[in-house]
Image (tube, rainbow, N blue to C red):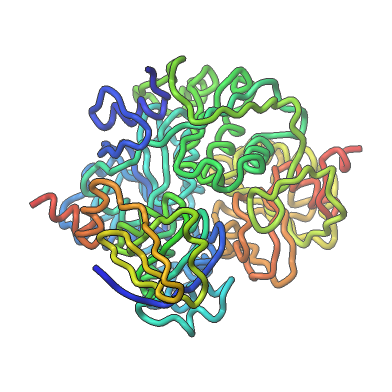
Amino acid sequence: MGMTMTEKILATHAGCAKVEPGQLIRAKVDFLLANDITGPQAIPEFDKIGRPVFDPDKIALIPDHFIPNKDIKSAEQAKVMREFARKHKITHYVEVGRMGIEHVLLPEMGWVLPGEIIIGADSHTCTYGAVGAFATGVGGTDLGASMATGDTWFKVPSTIKVELTGALPEWVSGKDVILTLIGHIGVDGARYQALEFTGPGVANLSMADRFTISNMAIEAGAKNGIFPVDEKTIEYLRARTTKPYNVYTSDSDAIYAREIKIDLSTLQPVVAMPHLPENVKKVSDLPEIRIDQAVIGSCTNGRIDDLEQAAKIIAGRKIHPDVRAIIIPGTQEIYMEAMKRGYIAQFIEAGAVVSTPTCGPCLGGYMGILAAGERCVSTTNRNFRGRMGHVDSEVYLASPAVAAASAIMGRIAEPKEVLA
Amino acid sequence: MKFTGKVWRYGDNIDTDVIIPARYLNTSNPQELALHCMEDIDKSFVSGVKTGDIMVADNNFGCGSSREHAPVAIKASGITCVIAANFARIFYRNAINIGLPLLEVGKDVAKIKAGDTLSIDLETGEIVNTTTSERIQAQPLPGFIQDIARAGGLINYVKGSAQ
C-alpha cells in the first residue's frame, strides 16, 4: 500500500520506511518560525531547557504582527525577540524596513522548500504547503522546545484528497477556491487531517493562488494543506534559491480518508459571512450589505498578484466616500514591485491608504480596528467575533477582486458590477 | 490526580480569538491574559470563575490561531481541566505542553450542563457528574503524550529526557 506525499515527508524525517495515519512519531524539523507575538512566549520556554539553539541558520524570527511597534508593550515584545536573535546569532531575523508578513516573506526569500518539515508558532504556517512542504502551526512552547532539539512530535494525519479540474473564470481566484471548500466541509471538516490539492486543475493555479489556498487550510481545521511540486513551483523557486530540495509525490495506491472534487471553472466570487469562515455565500446571492472598511493584504492575500487584481479594479476610479480602503503589500519587495507597476499611485489617487507590511488589522491589532456595528470586507483569513476590533463589528472574508469592487461600490460587490 | 469543580459551559467552535482577543496579545503575562479570558462571549466568566472550576464545550474547541496565550489564559483563570467533544489540533498540543489537562468525550459532552459539578479522575479519564449522577468515560491520552502530561508539560519532559 502506498503513501501520500504528507506521509512520505513525515516518514523520511522520522527515519521510518513507512508511517500510517494515527501513528505518533518524532520527526526532525528543517525550518522553524516565530513572530513578535509568539516568539516572546517561546523564548522563556527555550531558556528553561538550557541548551543552545540547534541551528541558528534554520530559525526565522519575523517581527510582523504588531510591527512597526504599535504601543510600548509591543515594543517590549519586539525587543525581547530582537535581543534573542542577536544573542543566538539567528541568521533569519529580519528588521523593520526589510521585513514582510512572515508567510509571504519566507517563500519569497527561498527559505522554505519542497519536501521539508517546517513548524511555525503561527497557525498560518500551513501556507508553505503550496511549495510541497509539510508545514504546520504550533504554539510557543512547542517552538521553544524545537529550537533546542531540532525535532518535534506529530500524530500522522490522514489525508483528504481535493481533486481540482478545469481553470478559474476571470475575477475568481485562490481565495474563492478555499472559501468554497471550507463552506462545503466546515471549519472542522479537516480537523487533524491533511488537505492534499491535486488533479489537472493545479497546473492552472498560480503560485499566489496556491499560497492562498494552503494558507487557509487551518480554517478547515487541517494540520497542513499541500500541493504537488510542478513546473510552476520549480520556476518560482529557481529565482529564489540554489539549495537542493526533495520532491515527494503521492503514490497512486495511497489511502485517502475522503475525496472531494472541485471543478474550478464552475466557481464564482464568494464571501464568508460573520462570524465563521464556513458561512460562505456567493456574492451574487447577497442582499445589499453596506461596508465601512475594506482591507486588502495579509498572509492570505498580500502578494503582487493580489495587488494586481485590486489595481485592475481600483485604477482610475474612486473609493466610495463612506469606505476606508486599507491596502497592505505583504513584503517590501512586493511594495516596490507595486510601486514600479504604478499600483501604489493608483490606490492613493483612488483614495485608499497604503501601509508598510504588517499583520495589524487582520487580528485586530492596529491599522484598521473596527468600531461597534462597523462592517469590513477583508482579504484576511478569519472573521471570528471581535477578530478585527469591537465584539459587535463584522468581517466578511473575500478575494482581493471582491474587496476592491466593494471598496468602490460601498457595498459587497462583484468585480463585474464595477467594470460593467 | 482527582478533583471536583463547577462547570462553565460553551458551544461549538470556540475560537482562540474569543478565548483571548488579540488586542491583549501585547503581553505574555498569564495573570494579565486571564483578566480578559472569554470576555467577548461571556462577560461573567472572569468575575465568576473560581479556582478548580472546569470548562466544558462542544466540537472543535480552540480553533483558529496558534496563540498559546489561549490555554495560558484559561489555566491562569483558575480552570483545572477543559472537557470537549473534541479539540482543534494546535490548541490540543498547546494545552498539553503547558500542563492544562484536557479530556475528549465525544457526544457524551451533551450530558454536562452549565453549573453542574463534576468529579474527575485524570489518570483513568472517568468523569462523574455529581449533579446528575451520570458517569462519562473520556478517551485516554495517547502514548508519550501521557508522559508529557505527567511531566507537567513539554519543557519538563524535554529536560527530563535529556538527563
Q: Could you say where residue A180 lies in the image, as x and y percent from the top left?
A: 68, 39
Query: Which residue is most to the front?
Result: B133
Query: Residue A172 appears in which quarter of the rendering?
Result: top right
Q: Nearer the viewer, residue B39 or B127?
A: B127
Q: How many marks?
A: 0
Q: Could you say where residue A280 lies in the image, as x and y percent from the top left?
A: 71, 46
Task: Judge whether residue A319 can be spotted in this image.
Answer: yes
Q: Nearer the viewer, residue A167 or A195?
A: A195
Query: Which residue is most to the bottom?
Result: B47
The residue drawn where x is 36% and y is 65% is B127
Query: Residue A141 appears in which quarter of the rendering?
Result: bottom left
The residue drawn where x is 61% and y is 66% is A386
Q: Could you say where residue A102 lies in the image, as x and y percent from the top left?
A: 47, 47
Task: Judge whether residue A130 can be spotted in this image.
Answer: no
Drawn side of residue B162 relative to residue A124, left or right: left
- Quarter of the image with the N terminus of chain A in it: top left
The residue drawn where x is 39% and y is 64% is B135
Drawn side of residue B76 relative to residue A226, left or right: left
- Position of residue A16 relative to residue B133, above or below, is above
Drawn side of residue B134 relative to residue A14, left or right: right
The residue drawn where x is 64% and y is 66% is A369
- Quarter of the image with the C terminus of chain A in it: top right
- Position of residue B79 relative to residue A47, above or below, is below
Query: Which residue is most to the top?
Result: A252
Q: Could you say where residue A115 lies in the image, as x and y percent from the top left?
A: 38, 27
Query: Which residue is most to the left?
Result: B163
Q: Nearer the viewer, residue A399 or A357?
A: A399
